[in-house]
Amino acid sequence: MAWSASDGPASSLIGVQARVFEAIAGDGALVGTLGDLTRRFGTRSDDLLACLDELRRAGWVRAETDPGGALHLRLKP
């Protein structure tokens, strides 16, 4: 689900946050390049990064990058 004019920006980002969190919680981790993850969640890269930053600042998710540019997302213990 990509952002549309009928959705407010906040509601769109909350939906992406929820889908990202569910994916991490379900699999234990989420790994992929920014491009891979934006396609998977149907959003723009800046919106995905904003969602990940909110989840990280809330203390729910740990985000790391590897030398190849892949993002590694895990739930914080």
Image: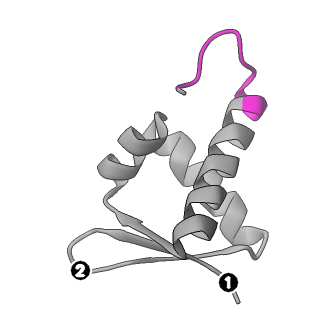
Q: Kindly identify the residue that appears in the image at 67 percent across and 50 percent down.
A: 17
What residue is disc 1 on? 76
Dominant secondary structure, magenta = loop
Quarter that holds the C terminus: bottom right
Earlier sequence position, callout 1 versus callout 2: 2
Q: Amino acid at mark 1?
A: Lys
Can you give x and y, in whole percent of width and height, for residue 76 in the image? 67, 83
Q: Does 39 sit left or right of 69 as displayed?
A: right
- Residue 19 higher or lower than 75, as above or below: above
Asked where in the image residue 4 lies, by quadrant, the reply is: top right
Task: Tell me the magenta residue range.
Answer: 2-11
Q: Does 66 sit left or right of 40 as displayed?
A: left
- Residue 9 higher or lower than 76, as above or below: above
* Residue contact at pointers 1 and 2, CB within 8 angstroms: no
What residue is disc 2 on? 67
Query: Which secondary structure, mark 2?
Result: loop
Please name whichever residue, 53 or 40, is drawn nearer the observer in this view of the structure.
40
Q: Amino acid at mark 2?
A: Pro
Quarter that holds the N terminus: top right
Q: Kindly identify the residue that appears in the image at 77 percent across and 33 percent down.
A: 10
